[in-house]
Amino acid sequence: MIHPIPSGTRDVLPDEMRELRAITGALRAVFEDEGYGEVWTPTLEYEEVLRRAESGTDPAYRVFDDHGNVLALRSDMTVPIARVVASRYAAAEPPLRFHYTAHAYRAVRPHRGQMREFLQSGVELVGAAAPEGTAEVLRVMCRALDASGLQDYRIALGDASLYPALLRSHDLAPETASRVLHELVTRDFVGLEREVLALGLSDADAELLISVPQLRGGGDVLDAAPGPVADAVAGLRQILERLDDTVTERVIFDLGLSRGLGYYTGAVFDVLDPAFGAPVGGGGRYDDLIGKFGRPLPAVGFALNIDALHQALAGEAPA
Amino acid sequence: MSGIDGLTIAVPRGALFKETLDVLDGIGIDTQPVRDNDRRLLFEECGIVTMRPSDVPTYVEAGAADVGITGKDVLREQSEREVYELLDLGFGRCTMVLATVDGPDPGAEALRRLGVMRVATKYYKIAAKYFEETGRQAEIVEVKGSVELAPLTGLVEAIVDLTATGTTLRENGLIVREELFVATARLIANPVAHKLKAEAIDEMLRRLRERQPA
């Protein structure tokens, strides 16, 4: 008898499970060694609590409990940990260091082979501001990836506040700015050029708005960045100065990097590997998120998608 | 062809095929092997893979090709694909239209009397979105083959389809009622390749911009 399971979910059988455990075990050992403590939080939370994050993505799966409360499956671990910090560590001396290996749940588009349920490992560093906190998390992430055995990965590093700051310098109406930003978030540079040219700016200003998000590469990329984004660029330089060569040689600056979640406030990063067509993981600074739960603390973290990491490792292995 | 070595390029067969190969020749990629053999699909010697235009975003999104060329119509229909749209190549110019049989507009008539227009298309999402945005109710019928047949047989009142010259529409007694948008060929890139092969992709972009006056 074949009994179906929901699309976007799957069974893991022993051969694969051993490989997944080897990966998560290697990551966990690094996180513990770096002084991070592991947490579990409930898979189901009150929807209204998760919504405080204003992440821009609604929980995909909701149920009513026996009292009529709306419960939701978490879509990442960052928001539950923000809740934990505000409610369970309300008076604890920062910085606080947590790591997790847990499933999260997102909506899928049909026929795309996307997972509704996926396993993430990551850390959250709470109460450590930029640039030190960001540099620590990047160092831990690279150490963890090295421990997993991944060879050829690179870190694309950008700043979520960079392009909005550049747009602000032109005093645009909010709906105009959000239309331009939409083109960037949907990765459409043809549309970006069309929207920017429609703004009626000087040629030089328009050229900057079009070219800056396409800048990516080594440190020379930062030299090409214009005045209005000087703060964000200075922030990226400060991170780089605090990293060892083993990490900096992995870094590619990407001034157009925009991660989908709405709560990022500063540096953001993606883990890219030539053996996998999408980011293996990523993260960034979310300095306002925990404040929304009642304890204003700067924070930074990352999550690695274990299935993606597993596939990248398999893709890198000599055939 | 230094600079763009090492890129795998997804090339669409069909209407955009010949012009795509001409453009690639123009930026220093030797496409002769592709022209010489129309049954082979993979041409490792020039870094080209050939496929249906609607498959190009699939291969590029997964990283099976680093960059690809396909029509804006395909990209609009598959708008959820996580690929970078880098350049409007300008060729392959077509218009997405709403067409019906000539004479009194049967679509408008259906909307007035029945409250809903039946529309056949290969572009389900584009058509559904267009009717939603224009505040009209439509029943979208997805067909795979010649869309022009559908209104002639009474299956639907109207079609949403891509037309270059309008010849096929005319020959089947159909006329354009509304134009949705103009579609041209676009260069797209895989998000990971866009960072990890930035130099090669930027070099390709530079050469493509040079050959087409902006």
Image (tube, rainbow, N blue to C red):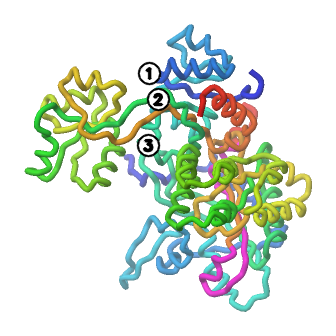
Give the residue type at disc 2: Pro
**Label 2 close to label 1 by CB (< 8 Å):** yes
Q: Secondary structure at mark 2?
A: helix
Q: Secondary structure at mark 1?
A: loop
| Any part of residue A99 in sight | no
Q: Residues within 10 Å of mark 2 (few under 14, many from 20)?
A: many
Label 3, on which residue?
B76
Q: Residues within 10 Å of mark 3 (few under 14, many from 20)?
A: some
The one of A229 and B147 positioned closer to us in this rendering? A229
A289 falls in the magenta region: yes
B184 falls in the magenta region: no
Query: Taking B97 as reference, is A80 above or below it?
Result: below
Label 1 chain ID? B
Residue A141, percent from left and from top: 78, 59
Give the residue type at disc 3: Arg
Along the horizontal axis of the image, is A57 left or right of A310? Answer: left
Residue B167, percent from left and from top: 28, 21
Query: Taking B175 as reference, is B36 above or below it?
Result: above
Q: Earlier in the sequence, mark 1 or mark 3?
A: 1
The one of B93 and A185 positioned closer to us in this rendering? B93
| Residue depicted at x 52% and y 51% | A198
Mark number displayed over residue B14: 1
Give the residue type at disc 1: Gly
Q: Earlier in the sequence, mark 2 or mark 1?
A: 1
Give how far apart the Cα atoms at labels 1 and 3 are. 18 Å
